[in-house]
Each structure stands twice: as C-alpha cells, then as structure tokens.
Amino acid sequence: MSKQEKYVSPEDIYDLQFPSDPQISPDGKKVIFVKKWIHKKEQKYYSNLYSVDTVRGTVVQFTRGEQKDIKPRWNRNGKQLLFIRSTQNKSELLSFYGGLGEPMPLISLEDGDIQDLAFSPDDKWVAVLIQKYDVSGEDRKKEPLKRDIDRLFYRLDGEGFRQKRAVQLFIVKSRGGRLIPITDVPRDVTDFAWNHDGTGIYYVTNDHEDPDRHMDEESIFFYSLKEKRHVRIEKPAGPIGWVQADPEGKYLYFAGHFKPGHSWGAVNSEIQQLHLETGEIHSLTASLDRTTDMVTLGDITPSFVKQKALFQTSEDLLFTVSSEGANPLFKFNILSGEITPLLDGPECVVSFSMSRDGKNIAVHLAQMERPDEIWLLELNSEKHFRRITFLNDEYMSSISCNVPEEYHIPSDNAVIQSWVLKPPGFNSKKKYPLLLQIHGGPRAQYGYTWFHEMQVFAAAGFVVLYTNPQGSQGYGHAFADAITGKWAEPAMNDLMAAVDYILELGFVDPEQCFVTGGSYGGYMTNWVISHTNRFKGAVTQRSICDLSSFFGTSDTGWDLEADFHDVPWKNPELYKKWSPITYADQIDTPLCIIHSENDLRCPVEQAEQLFVRLKYDKKPVRLVLFPEESHGLSRGGRPDRRVERLKLMLEEFRVKS
Ligand SMILES: CC(=O)N[C@@H](C)C(=O)N[C@@H](C)C(=O)O
C-alpha cells in the first residue's frame, strides 16, 4: 500500500509508541526514559525503561517484561539508578548499581504502592511516598460486606473508594535497609523535597481541620532528621502543586496561590519564593499571568503532569507554564528577576530533567507534527535543540496526515486561538463536513500535541475545528475566569463565532456540521444543542447535564461551590439556569450519549438523566455505556474500548452526513 493510501485509523493506537519522563544522567551522556506499550492480546498497558545515548543516538531497552516500570531517578554521581516497578501483586523500588544487569529490590511491598522517590543530596538516603492498603492480600480482591463512609471525599475517579490510610513519607538507605516512617499524618502527603544539605525533608499535606471542604488549603512542613521534629512552614492558605528546596538553603520554592475556594482552576498556580528566615513570600511568575500547571490536553500526550521547577545553577530556576496552546520552558534568574524563554516554539514541554552542569536538558516534547518524542536541549556556547528518539517515525512514514492550521478568531471581548485539521488530500474547492471538538476542564487548553482522535476524524473526511474558548487556561486569569458562575457563557458565543468564521472560508458544508466534547466539553455539547439547531448530529461524552446532581454525586462535586459561589440547595435557580437539562425540550439535534459506567468524576447518572428525558420525549437519542471504564476512557481506557469509542463516533457522524 502506498503512503497516500493509508490514513490514521482508530486501531493505530496499537502502533504508536508512548515515551515519557526522560531522565538525563548527571554526565549528560544518556537519557533513561519510560516507554508505555499496549499488550494487544491482554488489552493492558505496560511500561519499560529505555536508554538513549545522547551522542550516538543508540536506543537500548533497559528493562523488559509485562509490568509497569516508572520514575527512573539517577543519583548524583550517576552510578545508581532507582525506579518503581508495579506488578499485579507487588510494588517495588528497584536499584541498578554501576550499570546494567539485574535490578535489586530496595523495597518490596505486597501491602502498598510506592508512588514517588527522591535521593538525598548526599545520595545516601532515598525518600519515598507510599500508599499502604487498608486491606491486603486476597482480601483486596473481595468486595467488603458493607462500606462505612464517614468523609466527604470518599471516592476518586480512576481509583474507586479511597483508602482510609493516607499516603505517607518514608526513608530508606540507598544501598538497602529498613523502611523508616517519617510522617503519620491523617491526609495524604502529596509532595516532598529534600532540603539543600539533606538534614531534613519538606513535605505537603492538608492538615486543615475540615480537609475535604478545604481541599485547596494545603500546608508545608519541614521534618528535621536530626531533631526528629516536624515544623510547619507558615504561609497563607492555598493549594500547593509541588515544593522545591533552594540549593543555598535560604528559600523554599513552591507552586501555588493564595485564593483557596475561589475558582475551579481559574486562578494561576504561580512559583512562590518563601524566605525561610523572614517568612516573606514573593511570586516569581505573577508578571507572566500564566499557570505553572501543565493543563494541555491530549489523547496520547499526558496532561496534568507534575513537573517541579529545577535549579540549573544556584541562581537560575527552570520551569514551564501553560500558555496559548504551548508549554514553554523558561529560566528565572533569582538575582535579577529576569525571565528568559529557553524553548518557546509551538510545542509542549511535558517534562524535563537536567545534567549536573545544567547544560544538557532532556525534554519530553509534544508537537503537532508528530507523536511525542524525547529531545535534547544543549546549552553550550550555542543553544541547540535536537530530537534524540525517533520512536514514531516508522508509523508517521506509513500514514498520510496533515498538521493543524492555526487561526485567531475574533469573538466578543476576546480572540479565540483555534486549530483546523483538514483531511488528507484536502481540496479547497470541495465542501467538507465539519466536526467541532470542545475541550473539558474547563480550565485546560487544547494545544500543540499530535491528537490521535482529531487525526482519525480528518482521515475520515472531516474538517476538524478545535478551539480554546473563554474559560480555557493559557490566556491569563481574566480569560479563564470569564465563565465563573456561568460556565456556558461566554464560551458558547466564542464557539459559535469560531464555527461562523470557518464557514466563511468556504470549504465547509453548513448543512453538515457536527459537534462533540468530553466532560465540561460534553456539558458544552449539551448546551450547544439545547441552544441551536445548526448541528446535524452530536456526540456528548462523559458529560454533565445537571449541575445540581453533579454537586452531590461527582467524586469532588461540592468543589463547584468555588465556581458558582453558592450551593444548589441555597440557590437552586442558579444551578438550574446553567444546567443543560433545563433546556432539554429545546434539543432536536440527534444525539449519541457516550458514558463510562465507572465514571466517578461525571457519574453515569448524568448520562442517564439526559437519555431518559430525551427518550421519554421521543427525541432522536442513543445511549452507549462502556462497562468498567472511568472518566479517562478516551486516553487511558482499555485499548479495544478506546478503538470502539472512535469507531462508534465515526459511524454516528457518517450515517448522518
Ligand atoms: C476538573 C475536572 O475533572 N473537570 C472535568 C469536569 C473535566 O472537564 N475534565 C476534562 C479535563 C476531561 O477531558 O475529562
């Protein structure tokens, strides 16, 4: 088959390679990275470690087998590499010492999960985060007789009922020994960092007396290993993404803000510098008006990756932000306060690590031109950025696909960054069907990633339009906050302005417009079809239709108070006004509702309500449920179900077009 004849298909997820978490050796000579793969027969995801030589480019598989190997971490002299291995029955911290060979277990647990690790500055100790199970062994596989629920935050999407035991911090000698507990806190330790000289560890936990009502009020503590004492670091209330120690020991750095309960992700997470002696806090990134959270969405690129700022030298701190569809890499100079871009092209730095001299930076990079790969930024006399893995080149040379084109579309009070992906062999004289894709979050962004789903629809002959309407992150606080207390407006206006603009270009058939979206994007799909009949068909996925029931049934639904500044029982009219189900009698667009049965973020009752309402009214509606799956079906669900979802959507739109 010639290159021109093969287009992107739903099944191509089996051919794609998924590299992540590149960790460069201290001498800069090699990069260890994680490669996720799909076991087609078992329908499972596994991951192994690979190494790429930064000069020769040779790739060597470091670990093999059907397990999940994650978080490779070098010690400072580059002689030891630790990583976490999860198999069905065990969670292990494994160590390679002095090269390849068989990794040796430092920790091996059957009653818990190891979640994170970090070497102490002198390499003698390793700090680890561990979630111990409430019940272990065979009992874990059995359903309990009953469940006694005594807290608000009792379930988590993708996980299920939450463990009663919290994630705790431990230390272990890097050459092996006893696991020593550091914390015994009632709520999870969510991040930690060794201090500059390894005499203690900073850690983050929520110690609010009512933590579930105040989920975004986290505290930082310092544990002194010598004094065996925990000290709270005073700071105003607010959420914390990560903590990082200063190489000189003068400051503490963390990502966060001080407006808890203010909005659902619209407030930027900024890098805060806390003077350890005076307690003074100063935001390093306020002037950027961007969040340091990685909120770019994709279906093969990971989103919401926690990437700490890293010290390149004792004066220069490197960090990323989400900005206008990209995740640029910036350098902040502590002395001058100057912020310089190191990578600021149309691309997303998903995560990065640095060699000891700070001159070589390994980057997990997402781009629109190709699926994610590992790149190397060399900062010697000249800046040089080059790709060092070519994992998806064979796949890319086997298919024919386009790169999305960017548009900046005027709407009321805003300009909407948008992308149009045209079908292969596009001919501007023809009229194509249009698919409007709406992202979720709402405080997230579409951006510079190779998006499998968009490519599948373009390959099937659709012009795919995707945009970042107001409410998205990446354009400053005011832009993200514009939908607060409303959700549907002004996003609806922006989306329709984008469709109008593309129709004006003349290559779309106005009678053949379709719409889809997931989560908040599903909410907006429901809103769109209950407020206009311009679309010929719609697929709403993992959607929200009733904000009031969402408040009480979503795993963190009560958090909606932060966005609507009220609760449904005190202000039912507000919740009703902004719930698409209120306008269900106005829906005439044929609708397919796709939902996962185990979605705890947007519970399946949202789909059921909408389906029953429309079916009762004899409207054209179809409900497709995916058993066992959670909210993340489209990017992390069982591979055959991911394929089936895409095929189903194609079939829905094809039949109607
Ligand atoms: C914060 C959150 O989970 N919001 C959901 C309602 C949502 O819209 N999620 C998006 C990111 C999705 O695509 O699932």
Image (spheres, rainbow, N blue to C red):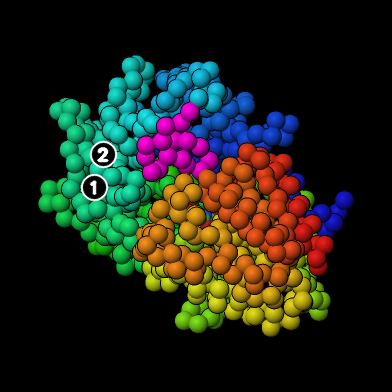
Camera sees residue 416: yes
| Residue 629 spot, x, y in % from top left | 62, 42
**Which numbered tag is attached to residue 357?**
none
Is residue 231 in the magenta section?
no
The part of the image, by quadrant, that contains residue 334 is bottom left
Per the model, the C-alpha gap separating discs 2 and 1 is 9 Å
Looking at the rendered image, the quarter that the C terminus falls into is bottom right
The secondary structure that most of the magenta stretch takes on is: loop
Q: Residue furthest front?
A: 616
Q: Residue furthest right?
A: 1
For the point 76% across and 52% down, the residue is: 647
Q: Which residues are magenta?
A: 146-163
Quickly name the residue at label 1: 252
Element type at mark 1: strand
| Residue 599 spot, x, y in % from top left | 56, 46
Q: Earlier in the sequence, mark 2 or mark 1?
A: 2
| Residue 16 spot, x, y in % from top left | 68, 45
Element type at mark 2: strand
Closer-to-camera residue (367/151) = 151
Quickly name the residue at label 2: 202
